[in-house]
Image (cartoon, rainbow, N blue to C red):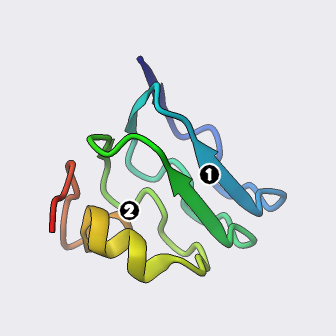
Amino acid sequence: MVTIEKAFVGCEKLEALLIPWNVVEIAGFAFSQCKNLKNVAILNQSIQIGRRAFLACPLANKDEMIARFGPGIFNERFVALAHTP
Protein backbone atom coordinates (compact mmCIF):
# COMPACT_ATOMS: atom_id res chain seq x y z
CA MET A 1 0.00 0.00 0.00
CA VAL A 2 1.55 3.24 -1.17
CA THR A 3 0.62 6.90 -0.75
CA ILE A 4 1.95 9.55 -3.12
CA GLU A 5 2.73 12.72 -1.19
CA LYS A 6 3.62 16.21 -2.49
CA ALA A 7 7.02 15.26 -3.91
CA PHE A 8 6.01 16.20 -7.45
CA VAL A 9 4.54 19.69 -6.91
CA GLY A 10 5.64 21.95 -9.76
CA CYS A 11 7.67 19.26 -11.53
CA GLU A 12 8.08 20.50 -15.10
CA LYS A 13 9.55 17.26 -16.48
CA LEU A 14 6.49 15.09 -15.83
CA GLU A 15 4.48 14.52 -19.02
CA ALA A 16 2.58 11.29 -18.29
CA LEU A 17 1.88 9.07 -15.28
CA LEU A 18 0.82 5.50 -14.77
CA ILE A 19 -0.30 5.10 -11.14
CA PRO A 20 -0.10 1.36 -10.29
CA TRP A 21 -2.57 -0.81 -8.38
CA ASN A 22 -0.69 -0.63 -5.09
CA VAL A 23 -1.13 3.15 -4.74
CA VAL A 24 -4.10 3.68 -2.43
CA GLU A 25 -3.90 7.44 -1.95
CA ILE A 26 -2.69 10.55 -3.74
CA ALA A 27 -2.28 13.44 -1.31
CA GLY A 28 -3.81 16.85 -1.92
CA PHE A 29 -1.66 19.02 -4.21
CA ALA A 30 0.60 16.00 -5.00
CA PHE A 31 0.96 16.87 -8.70
CA SER A 32 -0.28 20.47 -8.65
CA GLN A 33 1.43 22.95 -10.95
CA CYS A 34 2.97 20.18 -13.12
CA LYS A 35 2.63 22.34 -16.22
CA ASN A 36 3.62 19.60 -18.71
CA LEU A 37 1.58 16.74 -17.24
CA LYS A 38 -0.75 15.78 -20.07
CA ASN A 39 -1.92 12.25 -19.30
CA VAL A 40 -2.61 10.26 -16.14
CA ALA A 41 -3.73 6.64 -15.92
CA ILE A 42 -4.83 5.34 -12.51
CA LEU A 43 -5.22 1.57 -12.19
CA ASN A 44 -6.69 1.39 -8.66
CA GLN A 45 -10.43 2.07 -8.94
CA SER A 46 -10.81 2.71 -5.20
CA ILE A 47 -7.90 5.14 -4.80
CA GLN A 48 -8.40 8.21 -2.62
CA ILE A 49 -7.35 11.47 -4.23
CA GLY A 50 -6.89 14.60 -2.16
CA ARG A 51 -8.10 18.10 -2.90
CA ARG A 52 -6.38 19.85 -5.80
CA ALA A 53 -4.02 16.92 -6.43
CA PHE A 54 -3.89 17.90 -10.13
CA LEU A 55 -4.39 21.67 -9.84
CA ALA A 56 -3.16 23.56 -12.94
CA CYS A 57 -2.22 20.39 -14.81
CA PRO A 58 -3.17 20.50 -18.52
CA LEU A 59 -4.42 16.90 -18.64
CA ALA A 60 -5.77 15.71 -21.98
CA ASN A 61 -7.99 13.26 -20.07
CA LYS A 62 -9.29 15.83 -17.55
CA ASP A 63 -12.96 15.09 -18.34
CA GLU A 64 -12.40 11.38 -17.77
CA MET A 65 -10.62 12.08 -14.48
CA ILE A 66 -13.48 14.32 -13.29
CA ALA A 67 -16.03 11.66 -14.24
CA ARG A 68 -14.12 9.02 -12.23
CA PHE A 69 -12.93 11.02 -9.22
CA GLY A 70 -14.93 14.27 -9.12
CA PRO A 71 -13.91 17.89 -9.75
CA GLY A 72 -12.17 18.27 -6.39
CA ILE A 73 -8.95 16.83 -7.75
CA PHE A 74 -8.62 19.97 -9.87
CA ASN A 75 -10.12 22.75 -7.73
CA GLU A 76 -10.64 23.86 -4.16
CA ARG A 77 -14.40 23.58 -3.84
CA PHE A 78 -14.71 19.79 -3.71
CA VAL A 79 -12.88 16.83 -2.22
CA ALA A 80 -12.64 13.61 -4.24
CA LEU A 81 -12.48 10.38 -2.28
CA ALA A 82 -13.03 7.29 -4.40
CA HIS A 83 -15.74 9.08 -6.38
CA THR A 84 -18.11 6.77 -8.20
CA PRO A 85 -20.30 8.30 -10.91
**Rendered location of residue 60, percent (x, y):** 60, 81
Q: Is residue 48 left or right of residue 37?
A: left
**Rendered location of residue 47, percent (x, y):** 32, 41
Q: Secondary structure at mark 1?
A: loop
Q: Secondary structure at mark 2?
A: loop
Q: Quadrant of residue 20?
A: top right
The C terminus - image quarter: bottom left
Q: Write the residue at 70% across / 72% down.
A: 35
According to the picture, the residue beneath numbered tag 1 turns out to be 9
Above or below: residue 17 compared with residue 47: below
Q: Write the residue at 41% across / 17% down.
A: 1
> Who is closer to the viewer here, 11 or 45?
45
Q: Is residue 75 visible?
A: no
Q: Is residue 59 visible?
A: yes
**Rendered location of residue 79, percent (x, y):** 20, 59
According to the picture, the residue beneath numbered tag 2 turns out to be 52
Three-letter code, disc 2:
Arg
Mark 2 residue crowding within 10 angstroms, few (<14) / some (14–19) / many (20+): many
Q: Is residue 24 left or right of residue 39?
A: left
Q: Are marks 1 and 2 in contact (CB under 8 Å)?
A: no
> Who is closer to the viewer here, 15 or 74?
15
